[in-house]
Image (spheres, rainbow, N blue to C red):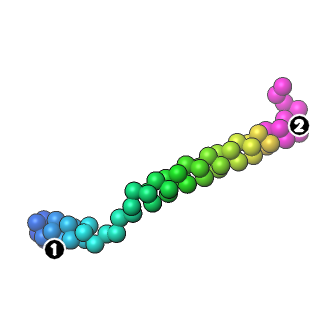
Amino acid sequence: MAVNPAKFLRDVRLEVGKITWPSRKETMVTTGLVFALSGIAALLLFAADQLIGIGVRALFGVGS
């Protein structure tokens, strides 16, 4: 099944033209939310790691 590369590229161009791209404002807001939620997740994981570390040290008496 051979595909004509020129037809393929024409079809790709047509499909890209149908895409509804987000506005600059929507992109900036979404990016900000991703950074904020990533930061919150990092802080929560850090806190959980510290608590688990404290528990392990208390349980096994290792570390300082």
Range drawn in magenta: 53-64
- 61 drawn magenta: yes
SS under mark 2: helix
Image position of 5 (left or right of 53): left
The mark tally for this picture is: 2
**In the rendered structure, are the residues bearing label 2 and label 1 in contact, judged by CB atoms less than 8 Å apart?**
no
Image position of 24 (left or right of 18): right
Mark 1, other Cα within 10 Å: few <14 / some 14–19 / many ≥20? few
Residue 39: tell me if it is visible. yes
Q: Which of 1 and 26 is in front in this view?
A: 26
According to the picture, the residue beneath numbered tag 1 turns out to be 1
Whether residue 4 is situated above or below residue 49 in the rendered picture: below
Residue 56: tell me if it is visible. no
Whether residue 16 is situated above or below residue 57 in the rendered picture: below
Mark 2, other Cα within 10 Å: few <14 / some 14–19 / many ≥20? few
Q: Residue at x 65, y 50 (%)?
A: 41
Q: Which of marks 2 and 1 is nearer the N terminus?
A: 1
- For the stretch drawn in magenta, the main secondary structure is helix
Q: Quadrant of the N terminus?
A: bottom left
Q: Residue at x 28, y 72 (%)?
A: 18
Q: Residue at x 15, y 68 (%)?
A: 10
Whether residue 17 is situated above or below residue 24 in the rendered picture: below
**Where residue 16 appears, x then y in whole percent?**
26, 67
Which amino acid type is shown beneath numbered disc 2?
A: Ala
**Where residue 2 appears, x then y in whole percent?**
13, 71
According to the picture, the residue beneath numbered tag 2 turns out to be 58
Q: In which quarter of the image is the C terminus?
A: top right
What is the C-alpha distance between the residues marked 2 and 1?
A: 67 Å
- 18 drawn magenta: no
Which amino acid type is shown beneath numbered disc 1?
A: Met
